[in-house]
Image (cartoon, rainbow, N blue to C red):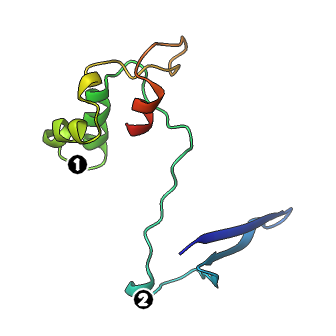
Amino acid sequence: GRRKGRRRRHATDGLVGDVTFGGEPFHEGPHPASERVPLSYIEQEPRFFSNLTVRETLTLDANLHGGDASDVDDVVRRLGLAACADTLVGGDTGGKEVRGISGGERRRL
């Protein structure tokens, strides 16, 4: 289903609003397992360390999130990033702009 939200600010309350899921109000508190929906937030413009390679970035992510770093080569292949696995990601984290992978490769990463 689609999730929609409406929010507004009140000077004393901070951020308040309503969230709906599939047109029905989504309330805070415990929900039965059948109603639980995994949610996550992903920034539109991902941030990577410009001085790491694609392979190093995926290894770091695996180490930080409890994944298995030995699966990195398989992930690189499945994402179609084998040709640039040892290329710097690039970008501007850390100051100066560093040339790296293409925009399409960055989105897949």
In the displayed structure, does residue 87 sit left or right of residue 40?
A: left
Residue 81: give x, y in percent of width and height. 29, 31
Q: Residues within 10 Å of mark 2 (few under 14, many from 20)?
A: few
Q: Which mark is residue 67?
A: 1
Quadrant in the picture for the C terminus: top left
Q: Residue at x 42, y 88 (%)?
A: 32
The residue under label 2 is 32
Residue 65: give x, y in percent of width and height. 30, 48
* Picture quadrant of residue 3: bottom right
Which three-letter amino acid code belongs to the residue tagged 2?
A: Pro
In this view, 65 is above or below 72: below
Q: Residue at x 44, y 37 (%)?
A: 107
Q: Residue at x 43, y 21 (%)?
A: 50
Label 1: element kind: loop
**N-terminal of the two: label 2 or label 1?**
2
Residue 42: give x, y in percent of width and height. 51, 49
